[in-house]
Image: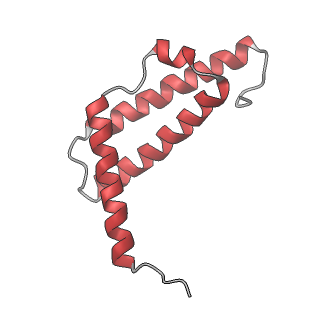
Amino acid sequence: MIERASPFAIYLVRKLQIRNLIRLQARRGDLMNTQEISALSDEKLVHTELQLERDLIAARFAHRTSQLEDHSVIKKLRRDIARLRTAARGREIEQSLPKDSL
């Protein structure tokens, strides 16, 4: 028989994950510059964008629950997502692909 974790245990694990994520993001500052983005493959570019979107959701959640110490993390994540989307759209135009097809 499989035991289920208590809701409180799940809450504590999630809280630690968010705290670690935020500390990591705050240490890194801007995650990527244009040279790093241009070196990524198309698949890795899309994967990185999706991961940053998940990180942004976690940071917003942490901000609303007063767990976010450095509020600039949200701004940095939004800008990094915008950089990745701009690079992805540029690649789509170069390859004559429709929008959001990478």
Image position, residue 94 (x, y; %) = 72, 11
78 left or right of 89? Answer: left
Q: Is residue 40 above or below residue 2?
A: above
State the quadrant of the C terminus.
Answer: top right
> Which residue shows up at 59% across the image and 28% down it?
45
38 left or right of 31? Answer: right
Render colour scheme: secondary structure
- Quadrant housing residue 85: top right
> Which residue shows up at 30% across the image and 58% down it?
16
Q: Residue furthest front?
A: 1
In this view of the protein, which residue sits in the foreground, 50 or 66?
50
> Which residue shows up at 56% across the image and 15% down it?
39
Image position, residue 5 (x, y; %) = 43, 78
22 left or right of 70? Answer: right
> Which residue shows up at 49% across the image and 84% down it?
3
Q: Residue furthest left?
A: 69
- Quadrant housing residue 74: top left
Q: Is residue 71 above or below residue 16?
A: above
8 left or right of 47? Answer: left
Image position, residue 44 (x, y; %) = 60, 29
State the quadrant of the N terminus.
Answer: bottom right
- Quadrant housing residue 29: top left
Image position, residue 88 (x, y; %) = 62, 23
In this view of the protein, which residue sits in the foreground, 3 or 34?
3
Q: Is residue 8 above or below residue 99?
A: below
